[in-house]
Amino acid sequence: MMNWQTKDNLLTLLTSLVQYESVTGSKGEAALAEYLYYLLKDKPYFQNNPAHVTLHPMEDGRTFLTALVKKKDVKQTVLLLSHFDVVDIEDYGEFKHMACKPAELLNSFLEKKSCFLNA
C-alpha cells in the first residue's frame, strides 16, 4: 500500500487514475468510482473508520463516492468536491488509443516531434 507522500508515489497514483477511460456515461466512469473507493478503503484511517468512505448508487446506474476524514477536537470542515469523468477522446486523433496511457502518449509525442525535427 502506497502512502502518496513522495513525487514518485503521487505520479504512480495519478497514472493509475488516468488509465481509467472514464468518458462521461461509460462503464469506465462507473469503474473509476469503485477503484477510488477501494484505494481509500485500504488506507489505515478508513480501515479504522469504514463508515467514512461510501459508494452511493444513483438512479442511472452510476455511483458517487463520499469520504470523510475527521480530526479529533476540530470543529471546522473543509469540503472538496470533484468529478472524474472526461469528455470524449476523439480530439487525440491518431493518438486516441493512448489517451489514457500517459507514458506511452508522451513517448509517441516525443517520437513524432523528433520526426518533424529530423525531416
Image: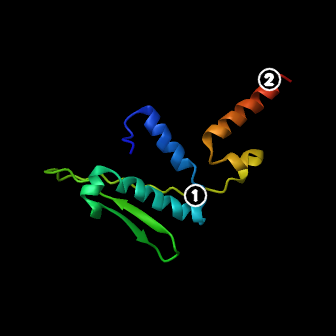
Q: Position of residue 25 (x, y in %)?
A: 59, 66
Residue 92 versus residue 42: which sits nearer the camera? 42
Residue at the extreme front: 1
Query: Would you place residue 88 above or below residue 59 in this image?
Result: above
Q: Position of residue 81 (x, y in %)?
A: 40, 55
Residue sitting at 71 percent across and 30 percent down?
A: 110
Instruction: Determine which residue is flagged by label 2.
Output: 117
- Label 2 sits on a secondary structure element that is helix
Q: Is residue 78 left or right of residue 111?
A: left
Residue at the extreme left: 73
- Labels 1 & 2 near each other (Cβ < 8 A): no
Q: Amino acid at mark 2?
A: Leu
Q: Quadrant of residue 52?
A: bottom left
Residue sitting at 44 percent across and 32 percent down?
A: 7
Estimate how packed mark 2 is, as few (under 14), some (14 to 19) or many (20 or more) residues with alpha carbons within 10 Å. few
Q: Quadrant of residue 114?
A: top right
Residue at the extreme top: 118
Which of the labelled discs sits on residue 50, or is there none?
Answer: none
Instruction: Determine which residue is flagged by label 1.
Output: 22
